[in-house]
Protein backbone atom coordinates (compact mmCIF):
# COMPACT_ATOMS: atom_id res chain seq x y z
CA UNK A 1 0.00 0.00 0.00
CA UNK A 2 1.08 3.54 -0.77
CA UNK A 3 1.67 6.28 1.73
CA UNK A 4 -0.36 9.49 1.51
CA UNK A 5 2.72 11.26 0.14
CA UNK A 6 3.11 8.68 -2.63
CA UNK A 7 -0.57 8.94 -3.57
CA UNK A 8 -0.37 12.73 -3.67
CA UNK A 9 2.80 12.63 -5.76
CA UNK A 10 1.21 10.31 -8.32
CA UNK A 11 -1.94 12.47 -8.53
CA UNK A 12 0.26 15.50 -9.20
CA UNK A 13 2.11 13.59 -11.94
CA UNK A 14 -1.11 12.58 -13.70
CA UNK A 15 -2.52 16.10 -13.44
CA UNK A 16 0.67 17.48 -14.97
CA UNK A 17 0.70 14.90 -17.75
CA UNK A 18 -2.91 15.68 -18.77
CA UNK A 19 -2.88 19.44 -18.23
CA UNK A 20 -6.11 21.06 -19.38
CA UNK A 21 -7.33 17.76 -20.88
CA UNK A 22 -8.24 16.82 -17.30
CA UNK A 23 -10.62 18.81 -15.11
CA UNK A 24 -11.39 18.12 -11.44
CA UNK A 25 -14.36 20.04 -9.99
CA UNK A 26 -14.73 19.74 -6.21
CA UNK A 27 -17.84 20.52 -4.16
CA UNK A 28 -17.40 22.53 -0.94
CA UNK A 29 -18.35 19.45 1.10
CA UNK A 30 -15.41 17.39 -0.14
CA UNK A 31 -12.54 16.47 2.16
CA UNK A 32 -9.45 18.72 2.25
CA UNK A 33 -7.33 15.85 0.92
CA UNK A 34 -9.44 15.92 -2.25
CA UNK A 35 -10.07 19.68 -2.46
CA UNK A 36 -6.31 20.35 -2.65
CA UNK A 37 -6.38 18.77 -6.15
CA UNK A 38 -9.58 20.44 -7.38
CA UNK A 39 -9.21 22.73 -10.42
CA UNK A 40 -12.34 24.53 -9.33
CA UNK A 41 -14.35 24.46 -6.12
CA UNK A 42 -17.89 25.68 -5.68
CA UNK A 43 -21.47 25.15 -4.69
CA UNK A 44 -23.66 23.07 -6.95
CA UNK A 45 -24.62 26.04 -9.16
CA UNK A 46 -21.01 27.11 -9.67
CA UNK A 47 -19.95 23.55 -10.48
CA UNK A 48 -22.79 23.14 -12.99
CA UNK A 49 -21.72 26.40 -14.64
CA UNK A 50 -18.04 25.40 -14.62
CA UNK A 51 -18.92 22.12 -16.35
CA UNK A 52 -21.03 23.93 -18.94
CA UNK A 53 -18.23 26.45 -19.60
CA UNK A 54 -15.45 23.90 -19.94
CA UNK A 55 -15.14 22.97 -23.60
CA UNK A 56 -11.66 21.51 -23.66
CA UNK A 57 -11.28 18.90 -20.89
CA UNK A 58 -11.65 15.37 -22.25
CA UNK A 59 -11.81 13.87 -18.77
CA UNK A 60 -13.85 15.37 -15.94
CA UNK A 61 -13.31 13.64 -12.61
CA UNK A 62 -16.18 14.88 -10.49
CA UNK A 63 -15.47 15.15 -6.78
CA UNK A 64 -18.98 15.48 -5.42
CA UNK A 65 -22.05 13.26 -5.51
CA UNK A 66 -23.80 11.32 -8.29
CA UNK A 67 -26.43 13.90 -9.31
CA UNK A 68 -23.71 16.53 -9.74
CA UNK A 69 -21.72 14.23 -12.04
CA UNK A 70 -24.89 13.52 -14.03
CA UNK A 71 -25.46 17.26 -14.39
CA UNK A 72 -21.86 17.72 -15.56
CA UNK A 73 -22.32 14.96 -18.13
CA UNK A 74 -25.48 16.59 -19.47
CA UNK A 75 -23.94 20.05 -19.73
CA UNK A 76 -20.70 18.97 -21.44
CA UNK A 77 -20.02 17.83 -25.01
CA UNK A 78 -20.03 14.29 -26.42
CA UNK A 79 -16.20 14.30 -26.54
CA UNK A 80 -16.06 14.96 -22.77
CA UNK A 81 -16.17 12.04 -20.33
CA UNK A 82 -17.37 12.46 -16.74
CA UNK A 83 -16.31 10.05 -13.98
CA UNK A 84 -17.32 9.67 -10.34
CA UNK A 85 -14.41 8.27 -8.26
CA UNK A 86 -16.78 6.17 -6.12
CA UNK A 87 -20.22 5.08 -7.34
CA UNK A 88 -21.45 4.89 -3.76
CA UNK A 89 -21.25 8.69 -3.55
CA UNK A 90 -24.96 9.30 -3.91
CA UNK A 91 -27.26 11.80 -2.18
CA UNK A 92 -29.89 10.42 0.20
CA UNK A 93 -32.15 13.38 -0.55
CA UNK A 94 -32.00 12.81 -4.31
CA UNK A 95 -32.97 9.19 -3.64
CA UNK A 96 -36.17 10.32 -1.92
CA UNK A 97 -37.94 10.97 -5.23
CA UNK A 98 -37.96 8.40 -7.99
CA UNK A 99 -39.52 8.85 -11.40
CA UNK A 100 -42.39 6.39 -10.87
CA UNK A 101 -43.46 8.16 -7.67
CA UNK A 102 -43.15 11.51 -9.41
CA UNK A 103 -45.29 10.51 -12.35
CA UNK A 104 -47.96 9.12 -10.03
CA UNK A 105 -47.91 12.30 -7.96
CA UNK A 106 -48.25 14.40 -11.09
CA UNK A 107 -51.20 12.37 -12.27
CA UNK A 108 -52.97 12.83 -8.94
CA UNK A 109 -52.10 16.49 -8.55
CA UNK A 110 -53.06 17.49 -12.08
CA UNK A 111 -56.36 15.62 -11.61
CA UNK A 112 -56.93 17.75 -8.50
CA UNK A 113 -55.67 21.12 -9.75
CA UNK A 114 -55.83 20.85 -13.54
CA UNK A 115 -53.28 22.72 -15.60
CA UNK A 116 -52.30 25.13 -12.82
CA UNK A 117 -49.06 23.47 -11.65
CA UNK A 118 -45.45 23.86 -12.76
CA UNK A 119 -42.81 21.43 -11.47
CA UNK A 120 -39.47 22.61 -10.07
CA UNK A 121 -36.70 20.37 -8.90
CA UNK A 122 -33.74 21.08 -6.69
CA UNK A 123 -30.61 20.02 -8.59
CA UNK A 124 -30.23 17.38 -5.86
CA UNK A 125 -32.32 14.98 -7.92
CA UNK A 126 -31.77 12.28 -10.52
CA UNK A 127 -31.50 13.04 -14.23
CA UNK A 128 -34.84 11.23 -14.68
CA UNK A 129 -36.58 13.72 -12.36
CA UNK A 130 -34.91 16.65 -14.11
CA UNK A 131 -36.12 15.23 -17.44
CA UNK A 132 -39.67 14.98 -16.04
CA UNK A 133 -39.49 18.60 -14.93
CA UNK A 134 -37.95 19.69 -18.23
CA UNK A 135 -40.68 18.08 -20.37
CA UNK A 136 -43.41 19.55 -18.18
CA UNK A 137 -42.19 23.12 -18.64
CA UNK A 138 -40.38 23.51 -15.29
CA UNK A 139 -36.85 24.30 -14.21
CA UNK A 140 -34.21 23.08 -11.81
CA UNK A 141 -33.11 25.24 -8.88
CA UNK A 142 -30.11 25.38 -6.58
CA UNK A 143 -29.89 26.82 -3.11
CA UNK A 144 -28.23 29.95 -4.59
CA UNK A 145 -30.97 30.76 -7.08
CA UNK A 146 -34.10 29.17 -5.58
CA UNK A 147 -35.77 32.53 -4.89
CA UNK A 148 -35.45 33.79 -8.47
CA UNK A 149 -36.65 30.50 -9.92
CA UNK A 150 -39.66 30.19 -7.58
CA UNK A 151 -40.61 33.78 -8.46
CA UNK A 152 -40.31 32.94 -12.16
CA UNK A 153 -42.38 29.77 -11.72
CA UNK A 154 -45.20 31.68 -10.01
CA UNK A 155 -45.35 33.96 -13.03
CA UNK A 156 -45.93 30.87 -15.20
CA UNK A 157 -48.51 29.01 -13.12
CA UNK A 158 -50.56 29.42 -9.97
CA UNK A 159 -48.99 26.41 -8.24
CA UNK A 160 -45.58 24.79 -7.89
CA UNK A 161 -44.70 21.16 -7.24
CA UNK A 162 -41.29 21.47 -5.57
CA UNK A 163 -39.07 18.33 -5.60
CA UNK A 164 -37.47 16.73 -3.60
CA UNK A 165 -36.48 18.94 -0.63
CA UNK A 166 -39.45 20.18 1.38
CA UNK A 167 -37.24 22.43 3.50
CA UNK A 168 -35.59 24.37 0.66
CA UNK A 169 -39.01 24.71 -0.95
CA UNK A 170 -40.73 25.89 2.24
CA UNK A 171 -37.93 28.26 3.25
CA UNK A 172 -37.74 29.82 -0.20
CA UNK A 173 -41.50 30.27 -0.62
CA UNK A 174 -41.81 31.71 2.90
CA UNK A 175 -39.04 34.22 2.10
CA UNK A 176 -41.09 35.32 -0.88
CA UNK A 177 -44.05 36.08 1.39
CA UNK A 178 -46.08 32.91 0.87
CA UNK A 179 -47.67 31.93 4.20
CA UNK A 180 -47.25 28.41 5.57
CA UNK A 181 -50.97 27.76 5.30
CA UNK A 182 -50.63 28.06 1.53
CA UNK A 183 -48.20 25.14 1.45
CA UNK A 184 -49.07 21.43 1.45
CA UNK A 185 -46.79 18.41 1.51
CA UNK A 186 -47.01 15.54 -0.97
CA UNK A 187 -46.23 12.27 0.78
CA UNK A 188 -44.90 9.91 -1.92
CA UNK A 189 -45.31 6.84 0.29
CA UNK A 190 -48.99 7.26 1.25
CA UNK A 191 -49.64 9.22 -1.98
CA UNK A 192 -51.59 11.85 -0.11
CA UNK A 193 -51.40 15.57 0.23
CA UNK A 194 -50.83 16.64 3.82
CA UNK A 195 -52.03 20.10 4.83
CA UNK A 196 -54.36 22.70 3.33
CA UNK A 197 -54.91 21.20 -0.11
CA UNK A 198 -57.58 23.66 -1.24
CA UNK A 199 -55.66 26.89 -0.86
CA UNK A 200 -52.16 25.49 -1.36
CA UNK A 201 -50.01 27.14 -4.02
CA UNK A 202 -46.78 25.41 -2.99
CA UNK A 203 -46.82 21.61 -3.06
CA UNK A 204 -43.71 20.35 -1.31
CA UNK A 205 -42.32 16.88 -1.94
CA UNK A 206 -41.76 15.13 1.38
CA UNK A 207 -37.98 14.75 1.10
CA UNK A 208 -35.15 16.13 3.20
CA UNK A 209 -31.41 16.10 3.75
CA UNK A 210 -30.48 13.83 6.62
CA UNK A 211 -27.33 15.87 7.29
CA UNK A 212 -29.06 19.24 7.57
CA UNK A 213 -32.01 17.91 9.57
CA UNK A 214 -29.50 17.27 12.36
CA UNK A 215 -29.33 20.99 13.16
CA UNK A 216 -32.10 21.63 15.65
CA UNK A 217 -33.92 24.37 17.53
CA UNK A 218 -32.26 22.98 20.65
CA UNK A 219 -28.81 23.55 19.12
CA UNK A 220 -29.80 27.15 18.43
CA UNK A 221 -31.16 27.69 21.96
CA UNK A 222 -27.89 26.36 23.37
CA UNK A 223 -25.77 28.79 21.32
CA UNK A 224 -28.05 31.73 22.18
CA UNK A 225 -27.67 30.89 25.86
CA UNK A 226 -23.94 30.12 26.01
CA UNK A 227 -22.62 32.43 23.26
CA UNK A 228 -25.12 35.26 22.84
CA UNK A 229 -22.72 37.25 20.64
CA UNK A 230 -22.36 34.41 18.13
CA UNK A 231 -24.04 34.73 14.73
CA UNK A 232 -25.86 31.66 13.49
CA UNK A 233 -25.71 30.91 9.77
CA UNK A 234 -27.36 27.85 8.22
CA UNK A 235 -28.01 26.16 4.87
CA UNK A 236 -31.66 26.40 3.63
CA UNK A 237 -31.87 22.59 3.68
CA UNK A 238 -32.32 23.00 7.45
CA UNK A 239 -35.89 22.95 8.76
CA UNK A 240 -38.08 26.04 8.58
CA UNK A 241 -37.93 26.47 12.39
CA UNK A 242 -34.12 26.41 12.37
CA UNK A 243 -33.85 28.81 9.43
CA UNK A 244 -36.28 31.21 11.15
CA UNK A 245 -34.30 31.17 14.38
CA UNK A 246 -30.92 31.59 12.64
CA UNK A 247 -29.47 35.00 11.78
CA UNK A 248 -28.63 34.14 8.19
CA UNK A 249 -29.37 31.34 5.73
CA UNK A 250 -27.96 30.58 2.30
CA UNK A 251 -26.07 28.22 0.02
CA UNK A 252 -22.60 26.92 0.74
CA UNK A 253 -21.18 29.75 -1.39
CA UNK A 254 -23.18 32.32 0.59
CA UNK A 255 -22.01 30.88 3.93
CA UNK A 256 -18.36 31.06 2.82
CA UNK A 257 -18.75 34.63 1.54
CA UNK A 258 -20.47 35.89 4.69
CA UNK A 259 -17.89 34.43 7.05
CA UNK A 260 -14.86 35.39 4.92
CA UNK A 261 -16.05 39.00 4.66
CA UNK A 262 -16.85 39.31 8.39
CA UNK A 263 -14.75 41.38 10.82
CA UNK A 264 -11.89 39.65 12.64
CA UNK A 265 -12.99 38.56 16.10
CA UNK A 266 -16.55 37.80 15.04
CA UNK A 267 -18.10 34.55 16.21
CA UNK A 268 -20.06 32.09 14.09
CA UNK A 269 -22.07 28.92 14.60
CA UNK A 270 -22.50 27.21 11.24
CA UNK A 271 -25.29 24.80 10.28
CA UNK A 272 -23.89 22.87 7.35
CA UNK A 273 -21.73 19.88 6.45
CA UNK A 274 -18.67 19.10 8.58
CA UNK A 275 -15.89 19.32 5.95
CA UNK A 276 -16.96 22.82 5.01
CA UNK A 277 -17.25 23.89 8.65
CA UNK A 278 -13.75 22.54 9.36
CA UNK A 279 -12.34 24.36 6.32
CA UNK A 280 -14.01 27.60 7.44
CA UNK A 281 -12.41 27.13 10.86
CA UNK A 282 -8.92 26.62 9.44
CA UNK A 283 -9.14 29.35 6.81
CA UNK A 284 -10.50 31.99 9.24
CA UNK A 285 -8.10 31.79 12.20
CA UNK A 286 -9.06 35.36 13.18
CA UNK A 287 -12.67 34.28 13.92
CA UNK A 288 -14.30 31.92 16.35
CA UNK A 289 -16.21 29.31 14.36
CA UNK A 290 -18.07 26.22 15.58
CA UNK A 291 -20.52 23.73 14.13
CA UNK A 292 -24.09 24.55 15.19
CA UNK A 293 -24.44 20.88 16.13
CA UNK A 294 -21.50 20.12 18.43
CA UNK A 295 -21.30 16.53 17.18
CA UNK A 296 -20.54 17.86 13.68
CA UNK A 297 -22.52 16.56 10.71
CA UNK A 298 -20.65 14.74 7.96
CA UNK A 299 -22.27 13.87 4.65
CA UNK A 300 -21.25 10.22 4.50
CA UNK A 301 -21.73 9.92 0.76
CA UNK A 302 -19.68 13.06 -0.06
CA UNK A 303 -16.98 11.54 2.15
CA UNK A 304 -16.82 8.40 0.03
CA UNK A 305 -14.58 10.33 -2.34
CA UNK A 306 -11.13 10.20 -0.78
CA UNK A 307 -7.52 10.25 -1.89
CA UNK A 308 -7.29 6.54 -2.85
CA UNK A 309 -10.52 6.73 -4.90
CA UNK A 310 -9.35 9.89 -6.63
CA UNK A 311 -6.05 8.26 -7.56
CA UNK A 312 -7.81 5.07 -8.70
CA UNK A 313 -10.01 7.12 -11.01
CA UNK A 314 -7.08 9.14 -12.40
CA UNK A 315 -4.85 6.09 -12.84
CA UNK A 316 -7.55 4.38 -14.92
CA UNK A 317 -7.75 7.45 -17.17
CA UNK A 318 -3.95 7.51 -17.48
CA UNK A 319 -4.09 3.88 -18.59
CA UNK A 320 -6.69 4.74 -21.22
CA UNK A 321 -9.54 2.83 -19.56
CA UNK A 322 -11.52 5.23 -17.41
CA UNK A 323 -13.81 3.68 -14.79
CA UNK A 324 -17.15 4.76 -13.28
CA UNK A 325 -18.13 6.84 -16.28
CA UNK A 326 -21.41 8.68 -15.72
CA UNK A 327 -23.55 8.62 -18.85
CA UNK A 328 -27.08 10.01 -18.96
CA UNK A 329 -29.11 8.46 -21.74
CA UNK A 330 -29.52 10.87 -24.71
CA UNK A 331 -33.30 11.46 -24.72
CA UNK A 332 -33.39 11.80 -20.93
CA UNK A 333 -30.48 14.23 -21.06
CA UNK A 334 -32.19 16.31 -23.75
CA UNK A 335 -35.26 16.83 -21.55
CA UNK A 336 -33.27 17.37 -18.36
CA UNK A 337 -31.13 19.98 -20.08
CA UNK A 338 -34.33 21.94 -20.77
CA UNK A 339 -34.80 22.23 -16.99
CA UNK A 340 -31.12 23.03 -16.38
CA UNK A 341 -30.93 25.61 -19.14
CA UNK A 342 -34.13 27.32 -17.99
CA UNK A 343 -32.45 27.64 -14.60
CA UNK A 344 -29.13 28.87 -16.00
CA UNK A 345 -30.88 31.50 -18.13
CA UNK A 346 -33.23 32.93 -15.45
P1 LIG B 1 -25.10 23.90 -2.43
O1 LIG B 1 -25.96 24.16 -3.61
O2 LIG B 1 -25.16 24.98 -1.42
O3 LIG B 1 -23.72 23.58 -2.88
O4 LIG B 1 -25.65 22.62 -1.68
C1 LIG B 1 -25.58 21.35 -2.25
C2 LIG B 1 -25.84 20.31 -1.27
O5 LIG B 1 -25.83 19.13 -1.55
C3 LIG B 1 -26.17 20.75 0.06
O6 LIG B 1 -26.43 19.69 0.85
FE1 LIG C 1 -27.34 15.18 -0.31
FE2 LIG C 1 -27.52 16.25 2.12
FE3 LIG C 1 -25.22 15.15 1.33
FE4 LIG C 1 -26.06 17.46 0.27
S1 LIG C 1 -25.45 17.10 2.38
S2 LIG C 1 -25.23 15.72 -0.85
S3 LIG C 1 -28.29 17.13 0.23
S4 LIG C 1 -27.22 14.09 1.65
Image (cartoon, rainbow, N blue to C red):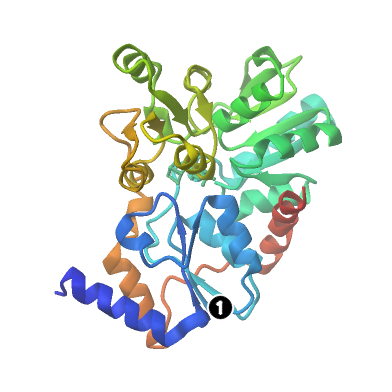
Quarter containing the N terminus? bottom left
> Residue 290 location, x and y as percent?
31, 32
Please indicate whether residue 207 sits to the left or right of residue 142 in the image. Answer: left
> Residue 297 location, x and y as percent?
32, 37
Image: 11 above or below 185: below
Image: 77 above or below 139: below
Identify which residue is drawn at 56% across, 61% down. 70
Can residue 105 be seen here? The reply is no
Image: 217 above or below 137: above
Can residue 176 be seen here? The reply is yes
**Secondary element at image label 1:** loop
Identify which residue is drawn at 43% across, 79% down. 322
> Residue 294 location, x and y as percent?
27, 28
Q: Quadrant of residue 8?
A: bottom left
> Residue 44 location, x and y as percent?
55, 51
- For disc 1, the neighbor class at 10 Å (few under 14, some 14 to 19, many from 20) is many
Count of numbered circles on the image: 1
Identify which residue is drawn at 55% across, 80% down. 58
For label 1, the residue is 57
Amino acid sequence: TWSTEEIEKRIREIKKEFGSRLFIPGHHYQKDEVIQFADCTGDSLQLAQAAADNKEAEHIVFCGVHFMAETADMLTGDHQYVYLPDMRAGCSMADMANIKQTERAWERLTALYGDTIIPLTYVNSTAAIKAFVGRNGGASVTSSNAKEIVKWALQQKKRILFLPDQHLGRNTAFDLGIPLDHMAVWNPISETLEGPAEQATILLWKGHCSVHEKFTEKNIAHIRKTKPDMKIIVHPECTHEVVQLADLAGSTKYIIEQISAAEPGTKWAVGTEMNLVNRLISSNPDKEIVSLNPYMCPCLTMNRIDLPHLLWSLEAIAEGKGVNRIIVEKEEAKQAVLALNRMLSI
